[in-house]
Image (cartoon, rainbow, N blue to C red):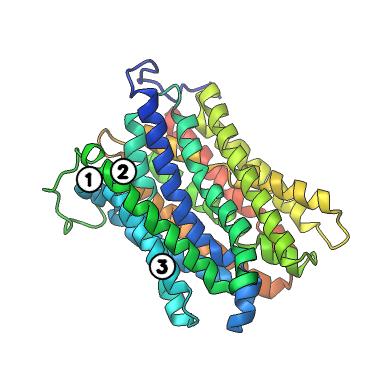
Amino acid sequence: MARVDRDAGSDPSAPSASRHETLLVLLVTTTVQALVTMNVVIPAAIAPEMAAKLGVSASLVGVQIGIAYGGAMVLSTVSGTLVRRWGAVRASQAALLLAAIGAAMMAVPNLAVFGCGAVVCGFGYALTNPPASHLLQRVTTARDRNFIFSIKQTSVPLGGIAAGMMAPPVALAFGWQAALLAGTAVALAVMVALQGLRASWDADRDSRISLGQNPFADLGIMWGDMRLRMFAFAAFFYSAMQLSLTTFAVSLLVADLEFGLVEAGVVLAVLQAAGVAGRVFWGWMADRLRDGNAVLLIIAAVSSMATVATWQLSPATPGPAVYGLFAAFSFAAVGWNGVAMAEIARMAPPGLIGAATGGVLVVTFSGILVGPPVFALLHDLTGSYTNTFGLFALVPVLGFLFVFSARRAETR
């Protein structure tokens, strides 16, 4: 297939914001998403401890993750509209507030309240990517878009690192509820700190936009473009694989490989650190190749091979090999998101980047909604996490096929 210039029609040398403004926007958007992600991931980081106190199976944490991202999927239908109406900073503040409230609710030792808290956290997560894409598109060019977006998307594994390093020790020392309440406090502090940026960064908000408009308008933008539609289906499978890995890594290490909870938390942090490195590397590669779709195809192939390798793990596997495999797995399976966000921004209609991103994220979050609960079900059927990862080798293969379909649609 002939090489396609994925930035055809754009000017890599077009004027952009000052370096200072770019760095500030990048810092703010990365911090917001990292903190919201941390509050969503904390239950996964302390799953064995929390499950023991609540009297449920640790595998049920997959249901919590699914519920959280189900909430994200629902609110994503209007997230682009909220960004245009409120402004990107106000939407980001709302994300932090919702994540704080959700984490506090999940600290209540009642499964019904815990489930509602997961939904509220998911609402917060839905309001992270659209405002970030709205702000970052102002300060990037075709030459650096994938790299900048990928650095911002390191916020997700950074949030996982924070959860993996903070939550298990706090849970063991002060109880599992203390870890969630710590997440609440930090999110609220940053929410207040962002207020000073609102006047200038939200100057383009439009209060005339009705919040009662068609809630499926953002979905229509995605569905009406063959490239965005295929891309959304691909993201369904990429996100299902990513969240299944980050959700069940600790449980696999403790239950199948006989790791202690704190050591398993360290492996989770290593896994997330590799995801950070992967996002930066893949974004750099996509800008060098000027072909984000090709990079996403490579990521899917590596992820599929890593699931097969995880299937072969046992308590006899040397510790360094376990660390190395999970790092390589995360480098690919967690590393895809920044390139994907940049591709969506590139393909979106002018002025509708937040709306297009929200539309694609509805399908993306549905993959997160489906993936971990399906993984939990398969675990109950197979009896081990390693066997379940073996079955999940098909998931990134399906993502590969949809990215390839989007690629073919663009060449036509």
Q: Which mark is residue 84?
A: 1
Image point (60%, 75%), residue name: 50
Q: CA distance from mark 3 to mark 1?
A: 24 Å
Label 3 crowd bin: few (<14), some (14–19), many (20+), radius 10 Å: many
Q: Are marks 2 and 3 in contact (CB under 8 Å)?
A: no
In the rendered view, tell whether residue 83 sits above or below residue 316.
Answer: above
Find disc 2 in the rendering and name its residue. 354
- Front: mark 3 or 1: 3
Q: Nearer the viewer, residue 7 or 135?
A: 135
Q: Secondary structure at mark 1?
A: helix
Task: Give x and y (percent) for residue 314.
Answer: 83, 61
Q: Secondary structure at mark 2?
A: helix
Task: Give x and y (percent) for residue 341.
Answer: 44, 40
Q: Nearer the viewer, residue 142 or 237?
A: 142
Q: Which mark is residue 102?
A: 3
Q: CA distance from mark 1 to mark 2?
A: 8 Å
Image point (43%, 35%), residue name: 342
Image point (61%, 44%), residue name: 275
Task: Give x and y (percent) for residue 30.
Answer: 45, 43
Q: Secondary structure at mark 3?
A: helix
Q: CA distance from mark 2 to mark 3?
A: 24 Å
